[in-house]
Amino acid sequence: MIRTPICDLLGIEYPVFQGGMAWIADGKLAAAVSEAGGLGIIAAGNASAEAVREQIRYAREHTDKPFGVNIMLMSPHAQEVAELAAAERVAAVTTGAGDPGKYMRLWNDAGIRVMPVVASVALAKRVARMGASAVIAEGGESGGHVGDLTTMALVPQVCDAVDIPVVAAGGIADGRQMAAALLLGAVGVQMGTRFLTCTECSVHPTYKEKILKATDISTVVTGKRLGHPVRSIKTPFSRMCQQAEYSAASDEELHGMTKGALRRAALEGDSQNGIFLAGQVAAMVTKEQPAAEIIREVVEGAEQVLKGADRWLA
Ligand code: TUI
């Protein structure tokens, strides 16, 4: 069995988080993951507080176990969703794509476990100082909004820099990677891509198909010119976005192309104009299976690796 301090901190059975994937991670997915003993996370993405409240209600009706809400800090609704999370007293809040500093007090006063996603040591230190309960150190292997550092380089540096628990994310989809993360000093893992194709995930079937068909080199990072690099599955559309970035197109034109593209992918499966965010581990996701089975496979796989970790010791 694998039990770490993050299990006690959150009252969960396994140190496995499901990433807060915008337009994808709803109350149904979060409840399934939490019910299976991990930490399910509802993604607020760009949604209104009203829409997020509905998902929180749904999750509460389907599990008594703790779950979290992910707040995408670039959202125009970030403030109202932050207040909603406090009012609803969800067990945990994770944040992404920015600095959550201005909300930390609000969430801490509401007794919420705050676990910002960080892509650098500087932000990890800052949120630790401001009262974060843990940090999620996410390497650029991840899907969606990415930082520059890899998980291999980032996780040990964040572990050395802060006294709070560190959860590793980015490039993790099986037991070997979970074991590696624990050996780097993390006390748990967050997986997004691995949960994308799970039975309880309502993302469009075309999206799941793109993950299941992916190879090791199927993802690409676009959006660097606008300062918001995102990793997604290579498609004719992502190629067009990439070319546009190096063309004379204005920033407004680039924004116009990608606006709503994630929603089109997740909800409509729009292969023409959708952007299918996914991590570098997409090719390791080979079947649709229940969340509980994913958690069991990954945790048992990590146990096997850790038990044999003295293999090369002379
Ligand atoms: O946030 C994510 N992944 C995401 S957010 C998202 S929605 C989106 N759509 C279009 C453009 C951008 C985002 C899709 N995927 N992961 C957590 C994460 N946070 N990764 C990297 C960061 C990060 C990067 C820079 C956090 C903070 C930061 O700098 C903060 C600062 O101001 O110093």
Image (spheres, rainbow, N blue to C red):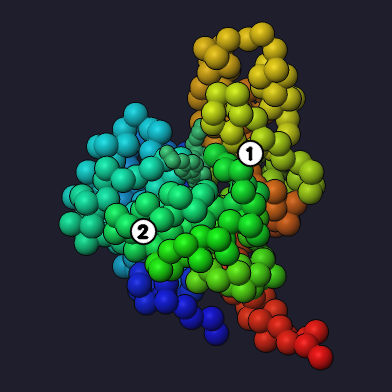
In the image: residue 310, left or right of residue 10: right
Q: Residue at (64%, 52%) from the top-left corner?
A: 150
Give the percent coordinates (x, y) of residue 304: 68, 82
Q: Which residue is mark 1?
A: 231
Q: Nearer the viewer, residue 148 or 171?
A: 148
Closest to the camera, between mark 2 and mark 1, is: 2
Q: Which residue is mark 2?
A: 128
Q: Nearer the viewer, residue 176 or 196?
A: 176
Question: Which element carries disc 2, helix, strand or loop?
Answer: helix
Give the percent coordinates (x, y) of residue 207: 63, 40
Q: Residue at (34%, 63%) from the top-left corner?
A: 133
Disc 1 CB within 8 Å of nearest ligand 1 atom: no
Q: Nearer the viewer, residue 157 or 137?
A: 157
In the picture, the quarter occupied by the N terminus is bottom right
Residue 37 found in image quarter: bottom left
Instruction: Inspect the image, locate mark 1, and give the three-letter code of the amino acid beneath it.
Output: Arg
Q: Nearer the viewer, residue 217 or 314?
A: 314
In the picture, the quarter occupied by the C terminus is bottom right
Badge 1: how crowded within 10 Å, few (<14), some, or many (20+)? Answer: many
Residue 254, placed above or below residue 278: above
Give the percent coordinates (x, y) of residue 27: 39, 51
Q: CA distance from mark 2 to mark 1?
A: 27 Å
Q: Residue at (42%, 72%) from the top-left corner?
A: 6
Q: Residue at (63%, 10%) from the top-left corner?
A: 249
Residue 284, placed above or below residue 263: below
In the image: residue 249, left or right of residue 216: left
